[in-house]
Image (tube, rainbow, N blue to C red):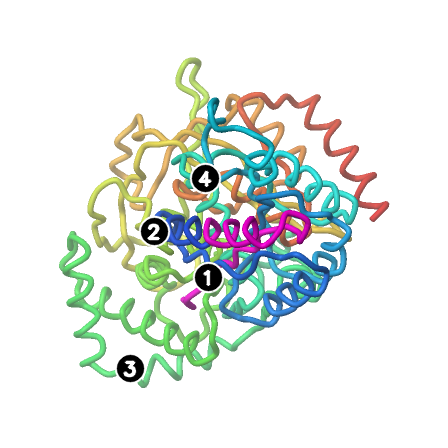
Amino acid sequence: MKKYEFWFVVGSQFLYGPEVLDTVAKRAEEMAAELSSKLPYPLVYKVTAKTNEEITSVMKAANFDDSCAGVITWCHTFSPSKMWINGLDLLQKPYCHLATQYNMEIPNEEIDMDFMNLNQAAHGDREHGFISARLRKPRKVIAGYWKEESVQKRLGDWMRTAVGAAFSRELRVMRFGDNMREVAVTEGDKVEVQIKLGWQVNTWPVGKLVEIMDAVTDKEIDDLMDVYRASYDFATDDIETVRYQAREEIAMKKMMDAEGCSAFSNTFQDLYGMKQLPGLASQHLMAQGYGYGGEGDWKVSAMTAIMKRMGKDGNGASAFMEDYTYNLVPGAKYSLGAHMLEVCPSVAAEKPRIEVHPLGIGDREDPARLVFEGKEGDAIVVSLVDMGGRLRLICQDIHCVKPILPMPNLPVARVMWQAMPDLETGIECWITAGGAHHTVLSYDVSAEQMKDWAAIMGIEFVHITKDTTVESLEKELFLNDIAWKLR
């Protein structure tokens, strides 16, 4: 991960004299320093901007500084917005308008016109907000006292989202083979995706992977086996099968790292020269932050990698997931999410087990995989689909529960959840929106973050919540369709 920072640009003007400008600058430095100690990335005070030239200069500099992941503005005093036009129009980095003020309360005995002239963020932020709206400039608006924990949390979440956007624009996805034959939703326009999201999605032959696998040494495998033993419980005596998964992982990691790739996909329909479909190998790579997509689903692979970067500590509890089957019993209606093998252990409730079991597809040897139950808690599932002419990001709120059944003969990682607003309505809404069967499930990334990410990337966002109805969603999709065709 790069060492990202965010730039703090404060608006003012010459009208109030040098003493006011000096006070604004000192307060801005103080705020940036204190917020930096609370936020996930440094907030660097850059300038108290008073002219068109200053604003344009700092926005140009932000565009060309790779360490700058976004710009946060605030107007301590009244800052005439015409002088922001050129700079904001040129700005290409994510942009957040922090509508706050230095002081928490109005000082009853001290307030006079001098105080009013200095502390007029309520005045300045409205002027500043107008010009962004007039320019149709995508931005995040966060209002509240800058020392409040809730404001700092939202600001921190937006920072993580902006870093996800920066990561997206440099993301490379390695495809081992093509998409599963005849499947529609895993397809997509890779050129359009690179234009909109920055992803470079290309294919490498499975035969090349096998060559790299054959060159993996026993010492490399031994070292990775030690990592497996420290991380997971062994529930198998078939050590050679586990060692083969280690061989696959080492080879895939070498290829991805050599090409600068942070995500990968494969398919059981193209395992040329391989003895096993990567299971444990893919899961442990995801635990290290790589994105993954099954059956050649490069879109969900990329989204998994991005959401891991957006999650807490840079590799949050986000995992490749698939809706597999339902429990439709009245009073106990749940979705069961799983996959053949490849669910990331970051979502595990307890220490995962390495097990070896037959796999009914792929026509290869029984693969080793991690088996576990997902943890309880609120989460989201996210799907990116190509609607032809535009990309749509669908997000659904869910609540994960401890599986209500032990399912002793199901040898895969699994997560069970309640879909919002309820199972049947949630299913109908998801299908109406065109959501895929592959998703990213995340406990650490919020729907608000995904909405912000979609806004930064300039794509459609659809959110299924506890209040969503099929009728309201149909109307939203209809209006969205018209709006996006007019763009």
Location of residue 375 in the rendering, given as x and y in whole percent from the top left corner: 30, 37
Give the label, 2 or 3, closer to the camera. 2
- Residue type beneath disc 2: Ser
Mark nearer the N terminus (1 vs 4): 1
Q: Which mark is residue 216?
A: 3
**Residue visible at 44% across and 14% down in the picture:** 330
The answer to whether residue 5 is seen in the rendering is yes
Give the label, 3 or 4, closer to the camera. 4
- Residue type beneath disc 1: Glu
- Looking at the picture, does residue 316 appear above or below residue 420? below
Residue labelled with disc 4: 146
Range of residues picked out in magenta: 1-28
Q: Residue furthest top?
A: 330
Badge 2 vs badge 3, beta-carbon distance below 8 Å: no
Observer-nearest of 412 and 22: 22
Location of residue 308 in the rendering, given as x and y in whole percent from the top left corner: 42, 54
